[in-house]
Image (cartoon, grey):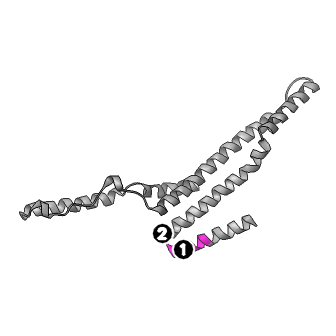
Amino acid sequence: AVVTSFIISTITSLQPNYTQITAVLMVEQINLLRAAGNLTAINAIPNSNVNLEMTTPGIKDLWINGLFLASLSLSLATALLSVLVKQWLQAYAAISSGNAREQAMLHQFKYSGLIQWKVPEIIGTLPLILHTSLGLFFIGLSLYIHELHTGISWIVIVVTIIAGILYVG
C-alpha cells in the first residue's frame, strides 16, 4: 500500500505535461489573435516548440518510477509465493484417511514432493525477496525526496544507508 501510494504520485512524471503543453499552445494562439487584430503578418509570430512525440521523462523520473515499480512487483511476487507455500504446507499437514501404512506412505509422498519442488528453499528466499523490495523502495524514496528538497533528503539517505549497513552486518 505504501509503495502504491508513491507510485500514484510519481507515475504522472512519466507522461507528457499536458498542462504545460496547453499553456504554450494558448500563448501561441493569443499571439496569433493579437497579430490578426494588429494586421501583423501571421508568419511573423514564432511557432511554439511543442512536439508531442518527443516528450520524454527525465532520467531521474525513470529511475524513481522504475525502483518503485520493481519494489511493488517484488512485494506482490512475495505475497503470491507466500500464499502458495501456505497452501502447500496445509496440504502437507492435512490428516489423511486410511490405515497407518497408507498414511505413512502418503506422508512420505507429500514430503518427497515438497523436497522435489524445493519448498524449503522457496520459503528461505521469501524474506530475501521482501528485503530486496524494501531496499529498492528506500533507494527510490531517497531519489524522490532528493528531487523535492535536497536538505530533507539527506535524512532519508542516511537512514537508508544505516539500515543497509545494519542489514549487511
The residue beneath circle 1 is: 152
Q: Nearer the viewer, residue 169 or 1?
A: 169
The residue lying furthest to the left in this view is 39
CA distance separating discs 1 and 2: 9 Å
Q: Residue at x 77, y 46 (%)?
A: 121
- Circle 2: element type: helix
Task: Inspect the image, locate mark 2, and give the three-letter code of the amino acid beneath it.
Answer: Leu
Q: Residue at x 40, y 57 (%)?
A: 56
Q: What residue do we see at 48% from left, 68% from top?
A: 147
Q: Position of residue 142 (x, y in %)?
A: 56, 67
What amino acid type is highlighted by mark number 1?
Answer: Ile
Query: Tag on residue 127?
Result: none
Magenta stretch containing residue 36, yes or no? no
Q: Is residue 34 above or below residue 114?
A: below
Residue placed at 56% from the left, 62% from the top? Answer: 140
The answer to whether residue 155 is magenta is: yes
* Closest to the observer, 36 or 8: 36
Mark 1 near mark 2, Cβ–Cβ under 8 Å? yes
In the rendered image, residue 103, in percent from the top left (x then y), is placed at 89, 28
Instruction: Pinpoint residue 27: horizontal percent, then vertical percent.
Output: 22, 62
Q: Which residue is mark 2?
A: 148
* Magenta segment boundaries in residue numbering: 147-157
Q: Point out residue 109 in the picture as x, y percentages from the top left corner.
A: 85, 30
Residue 105 against residue 117 in the figure, above or below = above
Instruction: Note whether 47 is above or below 53 in the view shown.
Output: below
